[in-house]
Amino acid sequence: MIPVSFLSEQISALKTLRKVWTEEQMVLVGASALGCFMDMRWRKTYDLDLSISVSLETFMSDLQRLPGWNPESKPEYRWTAPGGVRIDIIPASPRLLAAREIVWPKSGNRMSLLGLRLAFENNERIQISDDLFLHVARIPVVATLKMIAFQDSPAERTRDLADLAYILEEFLAEDDPRRFDDEVFQSGLSYEETSAFFLGKEIGKITNEAELARINAFLEILRDESHATLAQSKMLIASPASWRKDPTILLQRLDVFDKGIRS
């Protein structure tokens, strides 16, 4: 785990939300969660992404009472906190998670919540500042949510492709003992393939049938170089340097990742 670094304005906003909701109700997801575990040198992110275990009605009324917190018209889950901090907050009560979707009241837009249950079931409690702890979704959860979210709005999710490329390549630290596990040698994997394999293995352990179906659909999109989303070419453009030098590596990593899921 890398040292967690948040701006003072972000910490202030998170502390405000902690006064509204309990620690157990809040989970950090998205790129801000990924940055707690990986050195995101390929891009910077200043936005926060949270999932809150409350109803849609409670979510709206709680935030509307906060001084200086302003909702954005599009999308409805985005708020700007004092200091200009932009936060995407998704309500995810047990009832909403069971329904697997949320219908936003103003626009009527439907948002899939498939896979979001994983954030509450697979997270780590991390110290954000001297007096603030937060539950943070683990990398396999973030990766799963990004794969699902891309399919819901591919035009708006190009940065997710970059994140996923680096996750596939660098999920394991260079000295992670799993890189030298007996399973690696028995499976005939190279050192460079171990991150994708064990990422798939971890995701395979935590996902259900519906979530796996969306992951498989995402893999098929990436394997199709002529897909309407142009996902394969977009991922390659934003991928690690080794992938750009040899584009076949992307497909190789997808195959190893798939092998890890099925293991």
Image (cartoon, rainbow, N blue to C red):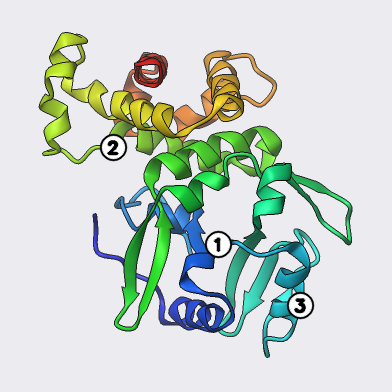
Element at label 3: helix
x 70%, y 78%: residue: 62
Mark 2 is surrounded, within 10 Å at the Cα level, by few (under 14), some (14 to 19) or many (20 or more) other residues, namely: some
- Reading the image, the residue beneath label 2 is 170
| Gap between marks 2 and 3 measured at Cα | 40 Å
x 46%, y 71%: residue: 23
User: In the rendered image of this protein, does residue 79 appear above or below residue 229?
Assistant: below
Quick one: label 2 or label 3, which is nearer the N terminus? 3
Residue 47 in sight in this render = no
Mark 1 is surrounded, within 10 Å at the Cα level, by few (under 14), some (14 to 19) or many (20 or more) other residues, namely: many
Q: Position of residue 211 (x, y in %)?
A: 57, 30
Q: Position of residue 245 (x, y in %)?
A: 32, 22
| Gap between marks 1 and 2 measured at Cα | 24 Å
224 or 242, nearer to the observer: 224
**Nearer mark to the viewer, of 2 and 3:** 3
- Reading the image, the residue beneath label 3 is 61
Element at label 1: strand
Q: Residue furthest bottom?
A: 67
Quarter of the image for residue 180 reads: top left
User: In the rendered image of this protein, does residue 56 appear above or below residue 121?
Assistant: below
Tag 2: residue type? Glu
117 or 127, nearer to the observer: 117
| Gap between marks 3 and 1 measured at Cα | 17 Å
Quarter of the image for residue 166 reads: top left
Element at label 2: helix
**Nearer mark to the viewer, of 1 and 2:** 1
